[in-house]
Image (cartoon, rainbow, N blue to C red):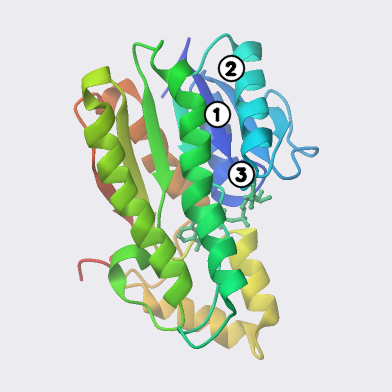
Amino acid sequence: MRGLSGLNALVTGGASGIGLATAWLLAACDADVAVLDLDPSAVPEPLRGYRADVSDDDMVRTAVDAAASDLSGLDIVVNNAGIGAVGTVEDGDEGQWHRVFDVNVMGVVRTTRAALPHLRASAHAAVVNVCSIAATAGLPQRALYSASKGALQSLTLAMAADHVREGIRVNCVNPGTVDTPWVGRLLDQAADPAAERAALNARQPLGRLVSADEVAAAIVYLASPAAASVTGAALAVDGGMQGL
Ligand code: NAI
């Protein structure tokens, strides 16, 4: 797939995991790619790194405008930066609830808000939000994380409606458990990491974790002109968790 020549993309959280796989695939499809991350120092060429925390509006605006200027415009925004939280509504203090919503929901608001003036100038504008099957699946011990991703899925639908007449498409992907450094960190904290990995595999009907490359392929499809009539969609890439 080399159909993204001439398009410019920005990927938040693009220095690791799903974001890095997506940035690489976009570049392999001939897009010019900017990565916005807390620490983009290790992002390899030809990806361009921009340092920003999506919970800081000034940093986001500065990074998005710099990327749009360096790339000569923006056509694709992948809102991927996100953080996790484990527990029920009894766990975590209010600060943690605010922090997760600030990154997982408001981070998407800030990045998209900063990118919209650039997207309006594109003939192929697309936003893809990295949501989660936790938005709809009712997973145990994920109350805060699920609530934030549920809000993000609703936000995706609202943004799709708001911007469809401007020619800006907005979709989301809902991954199941993906084999990324994030999940590696969760497993490292488990009493028995091998047993925990087996449990995560078993939770998915396909019997294995989703790969970051598989999620990236879905994101790049939604971002590409091949999906020109797709907006307001939530594409599950979850090994069957949602439907089976
Ligand atoms: P990861 O931890 O491997 O990578 C996340 C990247 O986001 C890192 O480079 C990190 O520096 C960056 N980041 C985190 N907070 C940031 C902030 N405030 N500002 C800017 N950058 C920030 O995580 P992974 O697994 O690749 O997850 C990426 C997205 O996929 C997240 O939104 C997550 O909720 C979602 N997701 C992940 C699943 C999984 O099982 N790994 C499943 C479903 C959704």
* Picture coordinates of residue 48, whole percent (x, y): 69, 25
Q: Are marks 2 and 1 in contact (CB under 8 Å)?
A: yes
Residue at numbered disc 3: 54
Residue 100 lies, in percent from the top left, at: 55, 62
Q: Amino acid at mark 3?
A: Val
Question: Badge 2: how crowded within 10 Å, few (<14), some, or many (20+)?
Answer: many
- Identify the image quadrant of residue 96: bottom right
Q: Residues within 10 Å of mark 3 (few under 14, many from 20)?
A: many
Q: Quadrant of ligand 1?
A: bottom right
Discs 2/1, front:
2
Amino acid at the residue labelled 1: Leu
The residue carrying mark 3 has its beta carbon less than 8 Å from ligand 1: yes
Q: Which mark is residue 10?
A: 1
Query: Which numbered disc covers residue 68?
Result: 2
Count all numbered tags in the image, as a single digit: 3
Judge from the rendering whether residue 19 lies leftward or rightward of residue 234; answer left or right.
right
Q: Earlier in the sequence, mark 1 or mark 3?
A: 1
Q: Secondary structure at mark 3?
A: loop
* Figure quadrant of the C terminus: bottom left
1 or 3: mark nearer the eye: 3
Tell me the distance, in whole angstroms, between the alpha carbons under discs 2 and 3: 16 Å
Determine whether 190 is above or below 64 in the image. Answer: below
The quarter holding residue 202 reads bottom left
Of discs 2 and 3, which sits in the foreground?
Answer: 3
Q: Residues within 10 Å of mark 1 (few under 14, many from 20)?
A: many
Q: Is residue 110 visible?
A: yes
